[in-house]
Image (tube, rainbow, N blue to C red):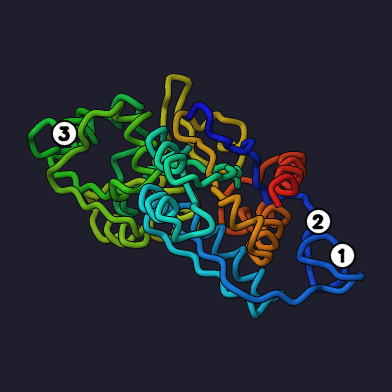
Amino acid sequence: MKGFKRSIVATIMIASMTFVTACGNDSGSNQNNGESKTLEGAVAIDGSSTVYPIMEAVSEEYMLEQPDVQVSVGFSGTGGGFKKFIADETDMSNASRLIKDEEAAALEAKAIEYTEFELAKDGISVVINKDNNWVDYLTVAELKALWIDNGETKLWSDIREGWPAEEVKFYSPGTDSGTFDYFNEVILEEATIVQTNLTLSEDDNTLVTGVSGDKNAIGFFGYAYYAENTNKLKVVPIDNGSGAVEPTNETIEDGSYSPLSRAVYTYVSNESVATKEQVADFVQFTLENAGDLAEEVGYVRLPAEKYEEALQTLESIK
């Protein structure tokens, strides 16, 4: 990525930043002599299904303040979102992993400059059916043994002695998903994912439905989707050598839920920010409110100073 003007990574967390409301704070959406400026137009966003709940919450709040701005939020997956971003079809691209070198190179080739903002922290949650009474935890090695392909049908009894000789049913995010990429990197170590009894979907709700409907199912996705469905699913603590740890706000924030804690991002077109007032305003609103809204939908906020740094970075590209 040499020679490519890439803006500094900033961090979006919806934390203790001032929440901009119609009640009168003069931070946030466009202000004109103390009064909110009415904007119009569109903001096009696509990308990670993991980031989708955050951006959906932000967009709903924003459109209450700016009803003439239409914010569309898609969830074609991190990779799918970057394809649209590279094609200059979107103003913002949500991602549950860092941009890949080849994606950055494609943007450079199209002369599209961008800024990366970190939005929150997430923990990939490994989940099983509520009626599964044998899996109490998994080591990282057992998790890998479950999910890598060996050309055979996987049985629970293959993983640990005493577990039932029943076929395991697998539910995974699709290959365009940043969650898939992250799991592939840190758990599978780039080995081929299991091919038998595997369901892939970019829609995390499809994965929730699949795991909750089969006693022998296992799946993984972002923590927010588990938090929304604790009545349907059981989360599996992961042992990375220091004891089994369950994903919670605390273990994700302090990094003890390892190696499945990670950051989530949005990437913003610098040109869109500079030339579309509604996009610049929406990004500012996102940075000012992401922390609170992220926690509302099951993610972990960043420190307040990260949002402040992000807002300073935004000012530099307007």
- Give the residue type at disc 3: Asp
Secondary element under disc 1, as helix, strand or loop, is: loop
Relative side of 223 to 168, left or right: right
Q: Which residue is mark 3?
A: 149
Q: Residue furthest bottom?
A: 68
Q: Which residue is mark 1?
A: 25
Tell me: residue 74, above or below residue 180: below
Where residue 166 is drawn, which disc sits there?
none
Q: CA distance from mark 3 to mark 1?
A: 55 Å
Q: Using the image as rendered, state which of residue 170 and residue 57 is in the foreground.
A: 57
Tag in front: 3 or 1: 1
Q: Which residue is mark 2?
A: 18
Q: Residue furthest right?
A: 33
- Whichever of callouts 2 and 1 sits on the residue coming sooner in the sequence is 2
Relative side of 33 to 252, left or right: right
**Residue at x-position 70% and y-position 48%:** 314
**Residue at x-position 60% and y-position 47%:** 119
Q: Which quadrant would residue 241 be assigned to in this image?
A: top left
Residue 208 at what x, y percent from top left? 35, 58
Q: CA distance from mark 2 to mark 3?
A: 48 Å
**Residue at x-position 42% and y-position 36%:** 105
Q: Which quadrant would residue 238 be assigned to in this image?
A: top left
Secondary element under disc 2, as helix, strand or loop, is: loop
- Give the residue type at disc 1: Asn
Residue 151 at what x, y percent from top left? 8, 34
Tell me: residue 249, above or below residue 210: above
Relative side of 62 to 106, left or right: right
**Residue at x-position 53% and y-position 58%:** 91
- Circles 3 and 1, Cβ within 8 Å, touching? The answer is no
Q: CA distance from mark 2 to mark 1?
A: 8 Å
